[in-house]
Amino acid sequence: MMSAKVYSAQPFEFKSDAIAPDKSISHRCAMFAVLAEGESRIENFLRAEDTLNTLKIVGHLGAEINDDGSVITIRSTGIHETSEILDCGNSGTGMRLFCGLLSSAEGHFVLTGDEYLKRRPMKRVTQPLRSIGAKLDGRNNGDLAPLSIRGASLKAFDYVSPIASAQVKSAMILAALRSDGVCTFKEPERSRDHTERMLSGMGATLHMDGLLTRVWPLEKPLEPLNIRVPADPSSAFFFAVAAAITPNSTAVIEGVMLNPTRIEAFKVLEKMGADITYTPTSERYELIGTITLKYAPLKGVVVEENIAWLIDELPALSIAMACAEGKSIIKNAEELRVKESDRIKTVVDNLNLCGIETEEYPDGYAVVGGELKSAVVNSFGDHRIAMSFLIAGLKCGMEVEDIECINTSFPNFFELLGMCTKVER
Ligand code: S3P
């Protein structure tokens, strides 16, 4: 088990166009290319464990993949049965979206993952997919991986999801594309909309109307993708928080996706007092631009809306809350309990180790801003917990154990962190 030590930082000017490419978009590029006719071209694909696992699975399913080290091309020959067990590693997105994609494919498929993924709930996709005719099973009556899928004909559906989850929505949209009629999916709150944008861009017919998405089955294969994956705002956010807690510092993050369903955490940081500007530079499937953050003293905030738009950033946001004046509260975020770790518990326990007062609720927590103290904390195998507490180290020094998980989403994290302060591994 590897650990890393971060030393407290002097004021810094962080500027980078090398933040890890977006994870959600990279997964989708690999999977959606399977439904296209012709060659998809993907530049700046995220070369991290989660997304490379997805790419490998797409290869097992029969796609021809070429990688010259910079551009990845994928040519689909349809979805083929395979003798391989399809290993999604740590990725809930991978496993849940593949459930939607494979439910209608001809053949039998087995999906598995690492020790953490095998504990995460899959019923949120297997149950609605089963209700339209999919033949999926797994431990605990289809809730836990390994999952087995036998492709079947899927019926058109009108599904009202009890949770705002882009993974559930995307799995159902993928199923809808190969069902026998027009389908609707309704969510309680809008979740990230990359699937809708990318599939529409590839020629699928989808109508988005508030919380309702209507999907028409494909009459012909999709057009291939031609995309450069923008930087991941969730990864960029670690460096925004770094500058937000270090007096007289700035962070300039270039080429980052500015989709409103992904930059809500930056908006909260602004509400807390940080000085942030967003400068759009281009648009392809998504709006892309530069985010600039200048340090300003932070104050506490209540976060209880648009939770799906900042769910991945809440651990890092909690570090900003710990450095703010006053109490911050996060509510309506029970989904945190079923991420790569129970993030309510892992954030609260680690903040307590750093001398920060907290209150834990079933659906969130409170953080009382104060003086962060140096500690030895564990990541619990969760990449975002590891990176959040390494960023906290800029304030007071920190040792984080079990840091290998960072490779699931942000392989060059330490290189960039080294631009802010001294790091030892
Ligand atoms: C993702 C959706 C989110 C997010 C995850 C990636 C996606 O999960 O937490 O890291 O790419 O669709 P939800 O399914 O809870 O929205």
Image (cartoon, helix red, strand yellow):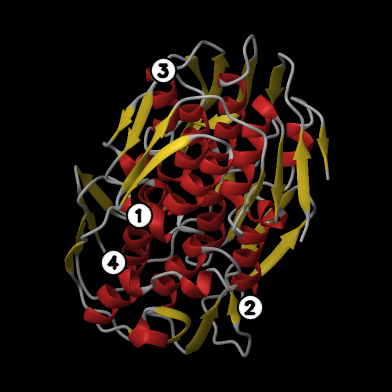
Residue underneath mark 1:
335
Q: Is residue 308 left or right of residue 6?
A: left
* Amino acid type indicated by mark 3: Lys
Mark 1–mark 2 Cα distance, whole angstroms, equals 32 Å
Question: Which label sits in the foreground, 1 or 4?
Answer: 1
N-terminal label among 4 and 2: 2
- The image shows residue 23 at horizontal and vertical percentages of 56, 50
Residue underneath mark 4:
217
Q: Is disc 1 placed on a helix, strand or loop? A: helix
* Amino acid type indicated by mark 2: His
Mark 3–mark 2 Cα distance, whole angstroms, equals 50 Å
Q: Is residue 200 visible?
A: yes
Residue drawn 46% across and 28% down?
A: 321
Q: Is disc 3 placed on a helix, strand or loop? A: loop
Residue drawn 52% across and 37% down?
A: 316
Residue underneath mark 2:
60
Mark 3–mark 4 Cα distance, whole angstroms, equals 49 Å
Question: Which label sits in the foreground, 4 or 2?
Answer: 2
